[in-house]
Image (cartoon, coloured by chain):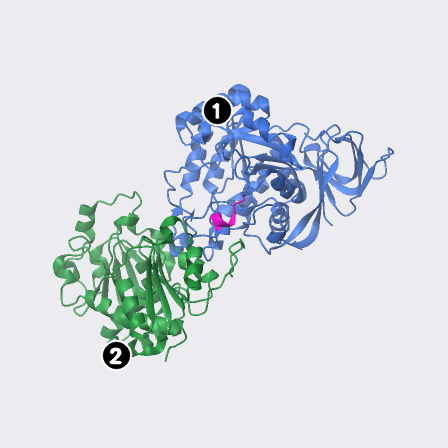
Chain colours: A green, B blue
């Protein structure tokens, strides 16, 4: 029984956990991506038969939740979804007590999404099964970065040397942090673009070689990949962002997108808000990989789950 | 406060007495009789006999340490700490006097509660000097009755944990402070700038996805308060736990302009930086937060050059259910009474080459001046018989699980430190001694 009374939390997570891209080596990432290429959701592989995957979601999600669920089932695992509403979490149960409970009913792996940065780390430090971070506050969303890399690599030969523009609300974005770590590790040239309040100068300290520009045109010009992010209105915490001004300066339009390379890829982690961070036609243009990203989420998460449970074949 | 020391004498012999207030740093013997310092003399010159003797050869004999900033958590939060457990931890850390903060349940904002806190039933084993709330219920709006609180034994007022944010209220507080010569202790934080923040704004906060507090949130308030203090002749402002270079500049300006402004720095702020916040370990979460390396450099310089008046721990015990949770939801604060001296010697003396005499001053004469503890913070004849005897060379490892505090929320568990308390004497009685 884990002792909740120990005030000095034990460090070091259970084997197989994926808490963030920052601490994962390029070799490990390459292996995961290679494994993902062998996964086909249409042809189930019962690598995780008899395993119980718990999906613990403290925050809203459509694509991440569904794709984890489909990935787990495609591998033969059973899945149980626990939402913060309608569970004992509403009654005030702590994160760790919920984790202990889910472990006690027989979970073999937990996928967790949480509004607080570091919540999966806390769980991983106290339970003896792998914890997969499905997005923690403003911190990281590692499986999103993996599926983005997977998607890019279906169109580009390698990440090294690619010019990637990440545009929008980077400060509040866990997707941005994970993507920046991953792309920088592999030698992509990452340019960040957004207004001061959504992209502080501090952002350049996240990885070596990052560049910030306040001009969308500057960021997109010559880019191989244009990644557009949503303005996270739920995380603004009183911050005032003039949306009209944002749209005029940072919205991805066809005119702006044409400044990128002819074969540039347009990406967005979703959910997209048409008419805000991108126009209707950009979302559906031939260069848009938005739907493909969602599709690729399944094999990538199959790989992550299989690897976490030591069943990567 | 201790009245039980009648007809008892204690001779501490062979030690090196460091008493900065008396400008003494020499091998001396100290005789404490009836709770007071009766004699300080060259070795073997004290002829009077003693009921009890303490061999201090190889040790430093200092005036009893005073901690200006301790959360004893009573009334109302005894699950975190009690006056008994908190003062036991203080004694183990070499503190003979602690000033306790009023953000309790209820808030310590009345003379009745000040009286309650000082009653012997509370089980204090060191001197407890209450700091009462500066505003009613600590809500920052209506001032408490400073005069009545002072008369009942409060040594200062503060809304610690929160700032006195309103300029109007703070101006009134400075005016009242000047009238009765009473220090106002400010937790300097412009909370309008720090909503939802859980650490210092820094590369680490950005990387961890934690909202960061700007250093200006502290400096802005210190700057304002220093100016307010200068408007009322005699007003006394004490800035609690200064943690930024900018705030120190404001304190320096105030001192230069002869404002009665004093400040304290905590051991964790002069030891750690925001880069130490790893793995979302909530034992590194406190307010003010750990700051940048350059802020830390500024604090080290200010500790050495006299800008800082006292080292204070901001000992803030919390229960596991308030700390072993998500970082952003965890309470601010760490314990600190038992590691203060070890950190001061390890970091300030051995690494920064600050003299032992200056360190002792920061633990004794400095804080005694801040809150006017007469006859404390020195070993001059007739002073209270409060002494801290420590071994500046002793190497030891801090084990949080053996702490006397009820709570173990410390980032220093397992730290190897140099400098350890050997005995703590309050009113002529040994209240703590290493085995």
Specify the quadrant that holds the C terminus of chain A: bottom left
Residue located 48% across and 26% down the image: B229
The reply to whether the C-beta atoms of the residues labelled 1 and 2 are less than 8 Å apart is: no
The chain holding disc 1 is B
Query: Is residue A68 placed above or below B351 in the rendered structure?
Result: below
Classify residue A291 as left or right of residue A120. Answer: left
Toward the front, the furthest residue is: A105
Secondary element at image label 2: loop
Classify residue B409 as left or right of residue A118. Answer: right
Residue B384 at x, y = what percent?
71, 30
Residue located 86% across and 35% down the image: B49
Toward the bottom, the furthest residue is: A313
Crowd rating for badge 2 (residues with CA inside 10 Å; few <14, some 14–19, many 20+): few
Quarter of the view holding residue B37: top right
Residue A102 at x, y = what percent?
41, 61
Judging by the rendered image, the residue that carries numbered circle 2 is A43
Relative depth, front residue between A89 and B254: A89
Residue B241 at x, y = what percent?
51, 39
Judging by the rendered image, the residue that carries numbered circle 1 is B144
Query: Is residue B363 placed above or below A86 in the rendered structure?
Result: above
How many numbered circles does the render carry?
2
Q: Give the range drawn in magenta.
A: B317-323
**Magenta stretch contains residue B408:** no
Residue A21 at x, y = what percent?
37, 65
Q: How far apart are marks 1 and 2 (CA)?
A: 74 Å
Quarter of the view holding residue B307: top right
Secondary element at image label 1: loop
Q: Disc 1 or disc 2, which is closer to the eye?
A: 2
The chain holding disc 2 is A
């Amino acid at each position: 029984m884990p002792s909740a009374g120990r005030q000095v939390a034990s460090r070091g997570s259970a084997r197989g956990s994926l808490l963030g891209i920052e601490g994962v080596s390029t070799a490990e990432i390459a292996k995961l991506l290679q494994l993902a290429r062998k996964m086909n959701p249409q042809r189930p592989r019962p690598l995780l038969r008899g395993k119980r995957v718990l999906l613990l979601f403290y925050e809203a999600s459509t694509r991440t939740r569904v794709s984890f669920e489909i990935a787990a089932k495609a591998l033969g695992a059973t899945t149980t979804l626990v939402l913060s509403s309608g569970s004992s979490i509403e009654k005030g149960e702590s994160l760790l007590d919920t984790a202990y409970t889910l472990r006690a009913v027989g979970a073999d792996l937990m996928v967790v999404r949480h509004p607080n940065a570091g919540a999966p780390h806390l769980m991983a430090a106290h339970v003896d099964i792998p914890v997969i971070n499905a997005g923690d506050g403003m911190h990281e969303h590692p499986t999103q970065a993996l599926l983005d890399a997977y998607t890019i690599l279906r169109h580009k030969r390698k990440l090294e040397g690619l010019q990637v523009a990440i545009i929008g609300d980077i400060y509040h974005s866990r997707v941005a942090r994970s993507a920046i770590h991953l792309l920088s590790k592999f030698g992509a040239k990452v340019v960040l673009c957004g207004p001061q309040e959504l992209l502080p100068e501090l952002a350049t300290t996240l990885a070596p070689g990052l560049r910030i520009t306040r001009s969308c045109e500057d960021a997109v010009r010559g880019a191989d990949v244009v990644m557009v992010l949503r303005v996270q209105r739920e995380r603004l915490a009183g911050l005032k962002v003039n949306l009209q001004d944002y749209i005029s300066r940072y919205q991805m339009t066809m005119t702006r997108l044409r400044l990128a390379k002819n074969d540039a890829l347009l990406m967005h982690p979703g959910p997209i808000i048409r008419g805000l961070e991108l126009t209707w036609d950009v979302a559906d243009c031939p260069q848009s990989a938005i739907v493909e990203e969602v599709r690729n989420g399944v094999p990538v998460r199959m790989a992550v789950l299989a690897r976490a449970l030591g069943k990567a074949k | 406060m201790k009245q039980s020391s009648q007809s008892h004498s204690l001779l501490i012999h062979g030690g090196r007495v460091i008493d900065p207030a008396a400008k003494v740093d020499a091998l001396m013997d100290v005789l404490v009789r009836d709770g007071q310092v009766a004699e300080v003399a060259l070795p073997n010159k004290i002829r009077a006999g003693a009921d009890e003797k303490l061999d201090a050869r190889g040790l430093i004999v200092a005036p009893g340490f005073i901690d200006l900033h301790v959360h004893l958590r009573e009334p109302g939060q005894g699950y975190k700490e009690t006056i008994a457990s908190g003062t036991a931890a203080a004694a183990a850390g070499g503190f003979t006097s602690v000033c306790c903060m009023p953000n309790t349940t209820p808030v310590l904002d009345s003379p009745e509660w000040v009286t309650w806190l000082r009653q012997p039933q509370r089980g204090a084993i060191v001197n407890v000097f209450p700091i009462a709330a500066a505003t009613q219920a600590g809500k920052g709006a209506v001032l408490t009755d400073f005069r009545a609180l002072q008369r009942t034994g409060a040594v200062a007022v503060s809304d610690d944990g929160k700032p006195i944010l309103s300029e109007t209220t703070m101006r009134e507080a400075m005016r009242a402070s000047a009238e009765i010569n009473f220090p106002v202790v400010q937790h300097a934080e412009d909370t309008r700038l720090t909503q939802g923040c859980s650490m210092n704004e820094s590369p680490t906060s950005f990387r961890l996805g934690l909202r960061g507090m700007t250093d200006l949130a502290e400096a802005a308030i210190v700057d304002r308060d220093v100016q307010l203090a200068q408007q009322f002749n005699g007003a006394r402002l004490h800035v609690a736990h200064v943690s930024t270079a900018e705030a120190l500049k404001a304190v320096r300006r105030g001192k230069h302009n002869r404002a009665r402004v004093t400040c304290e720095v905590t051991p964790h702020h002069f030891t750690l930086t925001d880069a130490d916040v790893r793995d979302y370990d909530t034992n590194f979460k406190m307010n003010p937060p750990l700051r940048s390396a350059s802020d830390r450099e500024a604090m080290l310089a200010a500790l050495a050059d006299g800008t800082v008046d006292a080292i204070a721990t901001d000992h803030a015990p919390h229960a596991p259910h308030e700390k072993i949770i998500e970082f952003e939801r965890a309470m601010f604060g760490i314990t600190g009474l038992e590691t203060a001296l070890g950190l001061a010697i390890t970091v300030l003396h051995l690494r920064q080459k600050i003299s032992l005499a200056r360190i002792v001053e920061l633990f004794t004469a400095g804080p005694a001046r801040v809150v006017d503890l007469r006859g404390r913070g020195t070993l001059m004849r007739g002073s209270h018989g409060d002494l801290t005897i420590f071994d500046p060379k002793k190497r030891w490892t801090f084990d949080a699980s053996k702490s006397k505090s009820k709570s173990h929320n410390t980032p220093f568990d397992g730290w190897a430190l140099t400098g350890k308390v050997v005995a703590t004497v309050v009113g002529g009685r040994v209240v703590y001694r290493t085995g």
